[in-house]
Image: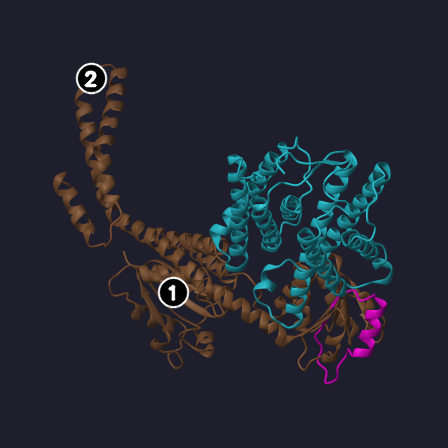
Amino acid sequence: MNIISVGVNHKTAPIEIRERIALSEVQNKEFITDLISSGLAHEAMVLSTCNRTELYVVPAMSEVTGEYLKEYLIAYKDARKEVRPEHFFSRFYCGTARHLFEVSSAIDSLVLGEGQILGQVKDAYRIAAEVQAAGILITRLCHTAFSVAKKVKTKTKIMEGAVSVSYAAVELAQKIFSNLSMKKILLIGAGETGELAAKHMCQKNARNIVITNRTLSKAETLAEELGTGKVLPFETYKEHLHEFDIIITAVSTKEYILREPEMQQSMQKRRLKPVIILDLGLPRNVDPDISRLQNMFLKDIDALKHIIDKNLERRRAELPKVHSIIEEELVSFGQWINTLKVRPTIVDLQSKFIEIKEKELERYRYKVSEEELKRMEHLTDRILKKILHHPIKMLKAPIDTSDSIPSRVNLVRNIFDLEEPNQ
Amino acid sequence: MDNIVHSNIALFILIQLVSLLYLVTTVLYGAHFFKDATPAARYKQPALALTVLVHVLYLGLLTSIEGYKLSYSTFNLMSMVALTLAITYIFIEFTTKSDKTGFFVLAFSAGAQLISSIFTAQSSGAGPAFTGFGIGVHLIAAIFGFSAIAIAGLYSFLYLLLFRQIQKNRFELLFQRLPNLEVLERLTMHAVAFGFIFLSITLFAGIIEQKASGEAITLFEPRLVSLVVIWLIYGASIFVRPITGWDLKHMAYLFIALFVFITALILLMTFFSPSFHGLALQNGPYYFTSPYI
């Protein structure tokens, strides 16, 4: 039983191609249902995110190859003009398993270690299961992938540290203040960047966030969304600067909105208690001279990118550990696949012995009492179990290559005179 | 004159073992902090617990010779400082849930214990042993006071290190591993508060005992003057800071300087002026000459 994966991702194709080939949830369901109902595949799953569209297929006939599936997907999306088979990767058997394990553990992602992908793989499996396209192989593959991802998350630091500017801002704030819930935060600018930073702050228990914006209604909407409900008019926020421990600026302006004299005054008012200003604006919103003030930490986007770079460096250093976890799981997954090949022989073997047992017991059915028959049945069951233990153990034993499976199967079949299995 | 360590095999083994354990524990904490080594992370806490246990056994055996009386030898006191630092650090690790500053505190403990072990093994006696409740309180409070000064100095140093890392945008190892500035500030100020309390006890117990005994001590003895100055500065840090708003960055320099100064002073005076506040260490109401001197 083979399992094939083909697809486009950020490593194999540019964004236009990825967009062209992407499948919505409805299309995903339709596509895999078609594959199964047309008899091309026993099992199928599609993982479609903004960075990848990948098919995982257990083919039902030898004609269904990687190339066939590429063409099938291109034809389904009617994208022959833009998408070519060269934009795809293809993997087989253990290569497929390795690929899905790498995807799930986020080492194949555009941003190394980004945490969303596992949820997306789980969604892909849920969809396949809903349309009954996930059989024994895909189910086992996905569950092993989830377990790999969990191990990677707990045993390595691949997902640690901020890798976005807004999250890096929060990480920096946490390196200065221990408890964000006790700190007063001013957000100047209710745009997308400011909103993201404020949301990250909220995730880290920041509760006292005051928002100011040129358009007050926008500030009010965001304050409501964050659940703080606190806003300041843009015209008067400078009078309150001394009240804030963290100031986040993210406005579009050509002039500095915070300058040294007003911040100096504010620092005096707050008796030099440390302040962090996170300038997320481009061009910068805050006069860089402010950083000279005592106990003032002013960080702009460039400074925050230093944090991101260092975190990515640390994540890359964790890659060998992740690969070793994947290798380990890959070996046990390969061994499980091999047991699938011996399963029919095990079933035949057990059936044959049960048949013999039942025939022999039948001969004594009317010669002994009910109770004695039960005892004989119990005894024969125990004998059969002991006789079959070793052959079954030998069939299931780990092997280095799948080549030795047929010889083991043949050996057992010959010794016990089993009929040839139906292909 | 026989050396106490050489004449007692159990003490000889324990003194080597304590130093070795301090070194091993420091290396483990260092390996975890700098290299993030997994075995170090696993074994460092058991190693610290074992170190403290063996150290307590060592001090118990050492003082048992004098009927569990404190010996006024700087080297023995250094050993007790090492122990109080290690115990204080365990308390800090337990309460802050941060095990990332252990290397810095335990390195100092290991250094203190190593010097203590070397000189104890080389000296001809353990020094006079003290008797009396008041002088005992005075000495124990002084040991805890010095440990608090050391903790305040070490955490101030870490505070400044992290402060500079953040200001210079160096988001590397120290930025990643050290606790945040607010935690370091809190630990420093707690150490200062405890230091102030212990130094207060040291001074008051000293004054009461001095009056009771009628012994004339040298008031301008450098150690005494330094401790009074530190006591005043620590007191001012606690009581004046909230009013004036002194920032920890500048205070940190002061705490480090005080720690370095008092450590150097104690060591220098041990070698060049070994007296107890100007009293010759021979006879007197609190102490008696040790039988192995």
Chain A's colour is brown
In the displayed structure image, the side of residue B154 where residue B243 appears, left or right = right
> Residue lying farthest front?
B1
Is residue B255 found inside the magenta-colored segment of the image? Answer: no
A287, above or below A350, in the image: below
Q: Check the picture and name the quadrant holding the C terminus of chain B.
A: top right
* SS category of the residue bearing label 1: strand
Q: Point out the tag, 1 or 2, that comes first from the N-terminus.
A: 1
Q: Estimate the x, y position of residue A210 in percent, counting from the top left.
A: 77, 65
Mark 1 or mark 2, whichever is nearer to me: 1
B280, above or below A361, in the image: below
Image point 64% across, 57% down: which residue? B179
Image point 74% across, 59% down: which residue? B258
**Disc 2: CA contacts within 10 A as few (<14), some (14-19) or many (>=20):** few
The numbered disc on residue B68 is none
Q: Amino acid at mark 2?
A: Tyr
Q: Amino acid at mark 1?
A: Leu
Chain B's colour is cyan
Q: Which residues are magenta?
A: A248-275
Image-quadrant location for residue A134 = bottom left
A254, above or below A141, in the image: below
